[in-house]
Amino acid sequence: MHDSRAIHRKPTGTPALLRLTLSLLLAITALTAAAQRVDRDKVSADETLYELLTSNHTAMEATPRQFTEKDLESTYDVNLFLVKGTYYQQETINNSFYVRKEGNGYQPVFDESYPMESFVNLMLNQVAGQDKKIAITQHVYKGKKTISPIPMSSIHDMLQSTMDVYCSVMSIKKSNMKAMMIFHHRKLDFIHMFILEATPEQLFSPQSVIEAELYGNIPQSNIKSLFKKYN
């Protein structure tokens, strides 16, 4: 005889399956909300950086870092010395710069005889009176923005109050130099990374403009993977 009670019997395990499904839905909802919040934060941060770099800013004259002869390291040239600084994440990304002995003192190098060293000094804002302009393509969330040529000294003036600057010349192919310039926020631990390319002619011609790609507001969790891409 057919047992009609079987029709009304509840499937075993349903409450556990329901709880799991609800938990998964809540987790997905939370992750989606977190992702949307991060997206909004990234959009806002990129817009703030864009507005800062396009503002009408007049930079103060650069103040070269103070050093003594004890800070100097010899190089391949008897008159050229490295002022050793600190590094960020890896030793090749640092703020060491170059000086040349002149008379009884030393002056930061910006000379056609030393293109790579001059490029480093320019990125680290160690060359007073050299207002080389940079044309920037800013990579923003899901797009790009163009920033008209801006003096390198203005970029430093606007960012260095809360950020430390580092650089690395990544490659030199024929006459083209490719470099990374990084501003690291000391408290919030994120970076703005500029990828620059220049020839000696661009570097030393008063009217030339250096091209740069800007990846701003990069959180600590994404920094190492980004370095791998450009190293």
Image: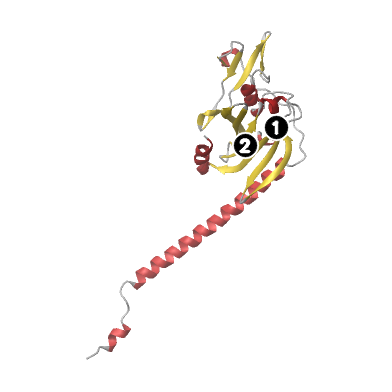
Residue at horizontal 57%, vertical 52%?
38
Number of the label disc, if any, that sits on residue 152:
1
Q: Do the residues labelled 1 and 2 touch (CB within 8 Å)?
A: no
Category of crowding for the residue at label 1, using alpha-carbon neighbours closer than 10 angstroms: few (below 14), some (14–19), many (at least 20): many
Identify which residue, 179 or 15, lies in the foreground. 179
User: How far across and how far down the image is residue 166, in percent?
Assistant: 59, 30
Image quarter of residue 116: top right
> Mark 1 or 2 closer to N-term?
1
Number of the label disc, if any, that sits on residue 194:
2
Q: What element carries label 1?
A: helix
Indicate how the structure is coloured in the image.
secondary structure
Image quarter of residue 155: top right
Residue at horizontal 46%, vertical 65%?
25
Residue at horizontal 59%, vertical 30%?
167
Is 77 situated left or right of 135 in this image? left
User: How far across and how far down the image is residue 64, in percent?
Assistant: 67, 22
